Image: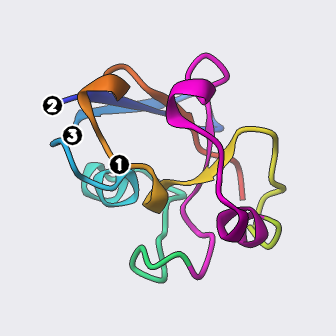
Amino acid sequence: MPLIHWSLSDGRAISDNVADGTHLMDAAQFAGVPGIDGECGGCMSCATCHVLVDSAWAERVGPAGEEERMLLEAAPSPAQAHSRLSCQIVATAALDGLVLHVPQA
């Protein structure tokens, strides 16, 4: 189970062990991470689970796909180079230690 870290805009951090195969939007909601609303339930239609992948992890996580990038343009906070929808990132052992920044809405 990889340990995932969510860094909040107010300086706080929330960390949780996440079962392999779990979408990180679901994991964030289970861990009580504020700012990860996931209003569409993870079906990639709302961009309310926007996160910024820490630059040290960007290559391992990979870039957003075309549809995901289009949704990120409508996110409540501006999309940046390493923006992703957390509903599209799945926990794996290779992501142990991943840092995700939750943008201020």
Numbered circle sitting on residue 18: 3
| 42 or 34: nearer the viewer | 42
Residue depicted at x 60% and y 26%: 59
Does 68 lie within the magenta span?
Answer: yes
Residue depicted at x 79% and y 73%: 74
Q: What is the magenta range? A: 45-72
Q: Amino acid at mark 3?
A: Val
Q: Position of residue 90 (x, y in %)?
A: 35, 48
Question: CA separation, marks 2 and 1?
Answer: 12 Å
Does 59 lie within the magenta span?
Answer: yes
| 9 or 47: nearer the viewer | 47
Question: CA separation, marks 1 and 3?
Answer: 10 Å
Q: Are marks 2 and 3 in contact (CB under 8 Å)?
A: yes
Quadrant in the picture for the C terminus: bottom right
Numbered circle sitting on residue 1: 2
Quickly name the residue at label 1: 90
Q: Position of residue 54 (x, y in %)?
A: 62, 26
Q: Secondary structure at mark 2?
A: loop
Residue depicted at x 30% and y 41%: 91
How crowded is the residue under tag 2: few (<14 C-alpha within 10 Å), some, or many (20+)? some
Q: Amino acid at mark 1?
A: Val
Question: CA separation, marks 2 and 3?
Answer: 5 Å
The extreme front residue here reads 66
Give the mark nearer the N terminus: 2 vs 1. 2
Q: Position of residue 32 (x, y in %)?
A: 33, 53
Above or below for 52 versus 84: above
Q: Amino acid at mark 2?
A: Met
How crowded is the residue under tag 3: few (<14 C-alpha within 10 Å), some, or many (20+)? many
Above or below for 101 versus 27: above
How crowded is the residue under tag 1: few (<14 C-alpha within 10 Å), some, or many (20+)? some
Q: Secondary structure at mark 1?
A: loop
Q: Position of residue 48 (x, y in %)?
A: 59, 69
